[in-house]
Amino acid sequence: MEEVDLKELFSYFLKRYSIILAITFLFLVIGFVYVMFVRTPLYKGDTTVILVNKSSDNNSQTITQSDVVLNQKLVSTYTQIVKSKKVLNQVIDKLTLSYTYGQLNSHVSVSNVSDTEIIKISVSDEDPERAANIANAVAEVFKEEVSDIYHLENVTIIDKAEVQSKPYNINVVKTLGISFVGGIAISVMLLFILYYFDTSIKSSEDVEKKLGVAVIGMIPHVGSGKRGRR
């Protein structure tokens, strides 16, 4: 593999800085157009529920260790129930959505907050109000289904989803930053490839380096301009 002269490579880049600027600018334009006019804005609605047993005896509000252990074991099961057909189909009917079960299922994500009995339900949608309404409806229907299936009143809604004013997937500064770095990286890579595979002779040093022969002398280049006659 041929060794690369870093000084010569740096000089090569400096002479062609306009190519780096042009490619980087092109990437910035593409990134701006994509994030502002192509990418569909999505809004998120988040709601959280917690598993806590409610005692039927108003005089006894103590939560035992066995209740905590039971709820922790139920968390993974409950996260599956949230996205079940039984729950989501009811949400579709309740809100008269045009989604099928599969479409709505792809919009809903469920996660468990580590080492807690808290379940977070997130819904993404092009309409911010619809995203919040779906998230709240899923939480309500899920709570009712748990009561019907397990005959337990151990699901309490902590935070209801609120309508968001800004899309979560649109970040102009971040996108332009990525485009800028990408433009520089691509342009530098392109110039390096052109430099590495450039076998043309540009100086006497190139003759000695590439052909392995000593340069005895150099013939100066004479311009071809015409001189005026006397």
Image (spheres, helix red, strand yellow):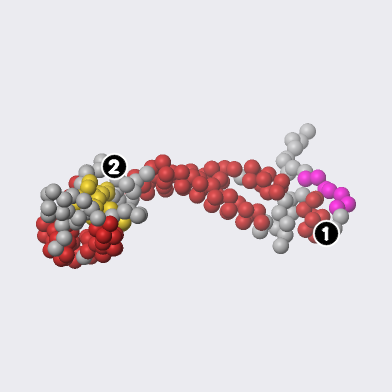
In the displayed structure, does residue 42 sit left or right of residue 100? right
Look at the image and tell me in which quarter the N terminus lies.
bottom right
In the displayed structure, does residue 208 sit left or right of residue 156? right
Q: In the rendering, at what x and y percent does residue 105 appear?
A: 24, 62
**Distance between the alpha carbons at the discs numbered 1 and 2:** 65 Å
Residue at image mark 2:
166
Q: Residues within 10 Å of mark 1 (few under 14, many from 20)?
A: few
Residue at 73% across, 44% down: 224
Q: Dots 1 and 2: beta carbons under 8 Å? A: no
Residue at 56% across, 45% down: 20
Q: In the rendering, at what x and y percent does residue 43 appear?
A: 27, 48
In the displayed structure, does residue 64 sit left or right of residue 6? left
- How many numbered marks are there? 2
- Residue 132 visible in the snapshot: no
**In the structure shown, which secondary structural element does the residue marked by tag 2 occupy?**
loop
In the displayed structure, does residue 14 sit left or right of residue 133? right
Which is nearer the eye, 94 or 115? 115
Magenta segment includes 138: no
The kind of residue on which mark 1 rests is Gly
Highlighted range, magenta: 215-221
Look at the image and tell me in which quarter the C terminus lies.
top right
Residue at 61% across, 45% down: 16
Magenta segment includes 220: yes
Residue at image mark 1:
212
Residue at 14% across, 63% down: 151
Which is nearer the eye, 194 or 138? 138
Q: Is residue 197 above or below residue 32?
A: below
**In the structure shown, which secondary structural element does the residue marked by tag 1 occupy?**
loop
